[in-house]
Each structure stands twice: as C-alpha cells, then as structure tokens.
Amino acid sequence: MELTYKCLECGYIYNCHGQCKDPPDKCPDCGASKENFVEVEED
Ligand SMILES: [Zn+2]
C-alpha cells in the first residue's frame, strides 16, 4: 500500500513512493495549490 495525493481539480496523482509526507506545493499539471490535494491510499 502506498500513500499518494490526488489533485481534486484535474485528477493528477502525485506518487512519492513513501518518500514524502506532504503533497506538492502546487499541482504540476493544473497549478492548483496543495489545499486541493487529498490523500489516497493505493495497494
Ligand atoms: Zn491538478
């Protein structure tokens, strides 16, 4: 199981492979701020 972050604006998945505890400062795809990211757990 891996923790990833999903952008609510565009659906971009930010997967840091367990290396991070926070979403990116902004979405690299649509530029939304990190408040727009939600944590998602994937197998
Ligand atoms: Zn986005």
Image (tube, grey):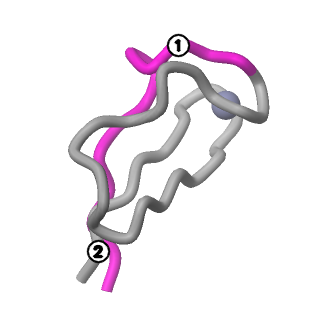
Q: Is the residue at mark 1 in contact range of ligand 1, meaning its CB lies under 8 Å from it?
A: no
User: Residue at coordinates 63% horizontally, 28% vertically from top-left?
Assistant: 27
30 versus 1 height, above or below = above
> Residues at badges 2 and 1 in contact (C-beta under 8 Å)?
no
Left/right placement of residue 15 relative to residue 20 reads right
Image quadrant of residue 11? top right
Residue kind at label 1, given as amino acid type: Ser
Q: Ligand 1 is located in which of the four quadrants?
A: top right
The magenta segment: 31-43
Element on which disc 2 rests? strand
Residue 30 among those drawn in magenta: no
* Mark 2 Cβ and ligand 1 under 8 Å apart: no
What residue lies at 38% left-to-right and 70% top-to-bottom?
Answer: 17
Residue lying furthest front in this view? Answer: 19
On whether residue 32 falls in the magenta region, the answer is yes
Residue of label 1: 33
User: Gap between marks 2 and 1, in whole Å?
Assistant: 22 Å
In the rendered image, the quadrant that contains the C terminus is: bottom left
- Of the 4 image quadrants, the one containing the N terminus is bottom left
Name the residue type under label 2: Glu
Up-down relation of residue 31 to residue 6 (above or below): above
Q: Residue at the spot x=48%, y=45% of the render?
A: 6
Q: Residues within 10 Å of mark 1 (few under 14, many from 20)?
A: some
